[in-house]
Amino acid sequence: MRKNILSKLLLASSILFSGSVFAKTIIKLGHYNSDMHPSHIALQEYFKKTIEDETDHRYEIRIYPNNQLGGEDQIVNGLRNGTIEAGITGLLLQNVDPIFGVWEWPYLFKDNQEAKKVLESPIANEIGQKMEKYGIKLLAYGMNGFRVISSNKKLEKFDDFKGLRLRVPLNSLFVDWAKAMNINPQSMPLSEVFTALEQKVIDGQENPYMLIKDSGLYEVQKYIIQSNHIFSPGLLQISLKTWNKIPKEDQVIFQKAAKLYQEKEWELAIEKESEVKEYLAKHGNEIIVPNESFKTDMISASKSLYDDFYKKYDWAKDIVQKINDAK
């Protein structure tokens, strides 16, 4: 009888012990895109699935779209201090080190394919590794897309920019770009843009195609000028505090999942961008593709920005050269 009871106690304790040893690790991953955005779909179908399947579900990746874990500032701060395990953000880390903002320097890339090639190159890895100094491990570069201008004013040549009241993000790079284009920049949070356009406080705004659709901004804009002035990536990151707790063999699986995510997210994003253009055209937006003269004028006007970059940052010329070599 005593042996029976003892055996049952030992069995129960072994089950409890094994349960604690093999307890599931939960990784919360927050981002700002909708649940229909290519980044969210790629996270669900490739990043999450690969990690969970290949670790026998020892990890659970919980994905929170639409800023459910906070805005970009909160995500970046959470990643740095370890209160948020993983996330996708833009280039907000440039606020602590300007080298991380280089990908959004104006007219750096001519198209999605060129941007993709560079962001898969050694120079992209080199810059990404520098994020670890600030408590973040970069896993992958995704595609938010080229930024385009939407406006209620038809813009067909460089001179048409003069006096245009254009909303830009709360970021000095975008303000300086707008001024170089003779645009009147109006910095405001994205949440205020729809109302500002509706009330004609501003004439237009600039964002990637997918965001223009998802946020409904196209409803209060007539024209979209495919300026492609700045390419915006989306960075898949994990807190270094979280990363350092993951065993090496599992880190390999996370990196495999991140590589697959990057590959599939770009495919989905490029396809989605084409679909969005068709959608906007069907809903009455006129898409204007700048002619060669217009493009040349925009690129020429941006040269003053690069002169400032080269004076301000001793690493700038070398980084830009490495980026151009990777194209």
Image (tube, rainbow, N blue to C red):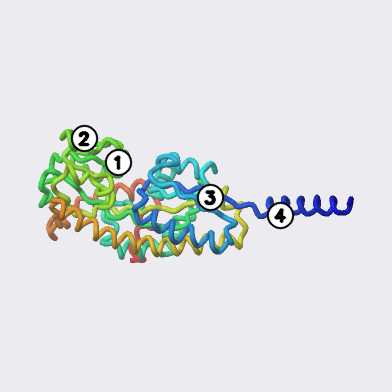
Front residue of 287/130: it is 287
Identify the mark at residue 18; answer none if there is no mark. 4
Check disc 2 and report its element: helix, strand or loop.
Answer: helix
- Name the residue type under label 3: Ile
Whole-number angstrom distance, CA of label 2 to CA of label 1:
14 Å
Amino acid on which the number 1 mark rests in the picture: Pro
Between discs 3 and 2, the one toward the N terminus: 3
Q: Please name the amino acid that badge 4 sits on.
A: Ser
Nearer the observer: mark 3 or 1; the answer is: 3
- Which quarter shows the C terminus? bottom left
* Label 4 with label 1: CB-CB less than 8 Å: no
Residue 175 location, quadrant: top left
Q: Which residue is painted at 16% across and 55% down in the image?
A: 281
Expressed as whole percent of the image width and height from the top left, the position of residue 103 reads 35, 54
Lower position in the chain sequence, tag 4 or tag 1:
4
Give the residue number, with chain letter if any, for mark 2. 196
Q: Nearer the viewer, residue 162 or 26?
A: 26
Give the quarter of the image for residue 326. bottom left
